[in-house]
Amino acid sequence: HTVHPSQQHAHPNEQELVVAHPSGSFSVQTSEMEFGHKDQQISKPMTTKLSSKLGIYQEMLTRPKTDVGTLRRLASNPNLHPDLQREILNHPETNNYVLRDLASNIDLHPDAQRGVLNHPKTGKYELQDLASNKNLHPDAQRGILNHPKTDENVLGSLVYNPNLHPDAQRGILNHPKTDGDMLRRLADNPNVHPDLHREILNHPKTDDSVLGGLASNPNVHPDLHREILNHPNTSRSVLRGLADNPNVHPDLQREILNHPNTNDYVLGGLAS
């Protein structure tokens, strides 16, 4: 079955994908490719160009003696077709090492990301690798937050993901396993949505280290600076963070100067 690159599709959200069969023949199917919120949908096109490599990879997967080493090399291959990623997930020899290589693959298709999440062998290390994947789909981010094996280390990997969706950021903030260290990571992360800064400020586990992260974060709205200054947990390190922040208003700098906890360390930030 030959597919011409200019062939039109019946549905705008559907794209053709080449499916490899053990017999060596290929067919074209359609696959819904868009997931997540309307304000952040990821559409990852599947190629319709049949390459000789695709057939070779398919044969490697169907060989009766394919070993774990081969599966790992295929799993980490960024050019591997999404269909073959799914075949690796279902391969009888797939183990935790293979799953980790898949999870770390920056070209892992959203369907395969979901497959890693739902795989019976997936544990916290596979979740950590998936959470660190910069192309992790928002649906998979939420799936990690709701996974029963997600712990503080998994959350720690997810919070530093540069493409963390605002919903996932809020999910970390409200996660029952989130502690002060996780809040600090959110507080000083320049990629965190500004709407969350006040929620971080008012979180019951917010301490001076969290306040310090907010104080030094250049993306925190100036309206919050005074609330940080007047927070009961504000320490000299928090004052120094505010003093170093170039976005703090001069009127607030004067208040920092007259704060009862201000010492030479804090003054050094104002002077620079």
Image (cartoon, rainbow, N blue to C red):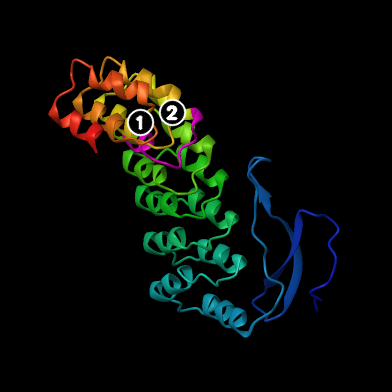
Q: Nearer the viewer, residue 87 or 161?
A: 161
78 lies left or right of 210: right
Taking the spot 72% from the left edge, 79% from the top edge, the residue there is: 25
Question: Callout 2: helix, strand or loop?
Answer: helix
Extreme-left residue of the structure: 264
184 lies left or right of 86: left
Number of marks in the rendered image: 2
Q: Is residue 89 magenta?
A: no
* Mark 1 and mark 2 residues within 8 Å of each other at the beta carbon: yes
Please tell me in which quadrant of the rendered image residue 40 appears: top right
- The residue tagged 2 is 197
Q: Report, in whole angstroms, how far the alpha carbon at label 1 lies from the one at label 2.
A: 7 Å
63 lies left or right of 32: left
Q: Which residues are magenta?
A: 183-195
Q: Position of residue 190 (x, y in %)?
A: 42, 41
Quarter of the image that includes the C terminus: top left
Inspect this view and state whether residue 186 appears: yes
